[in-house]
């Protein structure tokens, strides 16, 4: 239950923090720079009511602006909600191949 409380707290604040009671903002230029060279694939369902697709856009744009475009990708899957990207009946047809494509690209780079 502590995890849920943490997620609710950072959701209210709008940024990732350390644990309470300090709740120090971890979204700093220094921490963002530490993510350079780490390939990240942001994806969500267009109908995700839990984590709006705009949230991945904010993170994606922030990382690209700070660290360049090479390491980051983002896809929004139309017609999918919160867990549909992983557990949707047809996720294996459109989502899984796209995730695999990202993994293959990262592995070819040798990371």
Image (cartoon, rainbow, N blue to C red):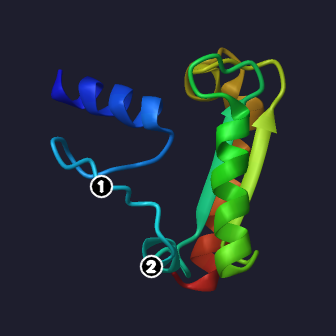
Secondary element under disc 2, as helix, strand or loop, is helix
51 to 79, vertically: above or below: below
Q: How many marks?
A: 2
User: Which residue is more in the foreground, 4 or 82?
Assistant: 4
Q: Can residue 99 be seen at all in this image of the molecule? A: no
Numbered tag placed on residue 8 in the rendering: none
On the picture, is 83 further left or further right than 96? left
Residue 96 placement (x, y as % from top left) = 66, 40
Crowd class of label 2 (few under 14; some 14 to 19; many from 20; radius 10 Å): few
Where is residue 89 drawn, in percent x and y? 66, 14
Residue marked by disc 2: 30
Q: Residue at x 45, y 31 (%)?
A: 11
Residue nearest the viewer, comparing 37 with 88: 37
Q: Which residue is mark 1?
A: 24
Q: Residue at x 84, y 26 (%)?
A: 78
Q: Quadrant of residue 53?
A: top right
Q: Quadrant of the N terminus?
A: top left
Q: Is residue 46 left or right of residue 59?
A: right
Q: Quadrant of residue 73?
A: bottom right
The x and y percentages for residue 25 are 37, 56
Position of 44 with respect to 8 (left or right) is right
């Amino acid at each position: 239950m502590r995890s849920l409380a943490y997620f609710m707290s950072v959701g209210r604040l709008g940024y990732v923090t350390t644990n309470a009671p300090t709740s120090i903002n971890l979204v700093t230029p220094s921490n963002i720079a530490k993510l350079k060279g780490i390939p990240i694939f942001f994806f969500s369902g267009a109908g995700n009511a839990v984590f709006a697709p705009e949230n991945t856009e904010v993170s994606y744009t922030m990382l690209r602006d700070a660290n360049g475009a090479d390491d980051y990708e983002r896809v929004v899957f139309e017609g999918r909600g919160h867990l549909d990207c992983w557990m949707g009946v047809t996720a294996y047809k459109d989502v899984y191949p796209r995730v695999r494509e990202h993994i293959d690209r990262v592995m070819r780079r040798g990371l």
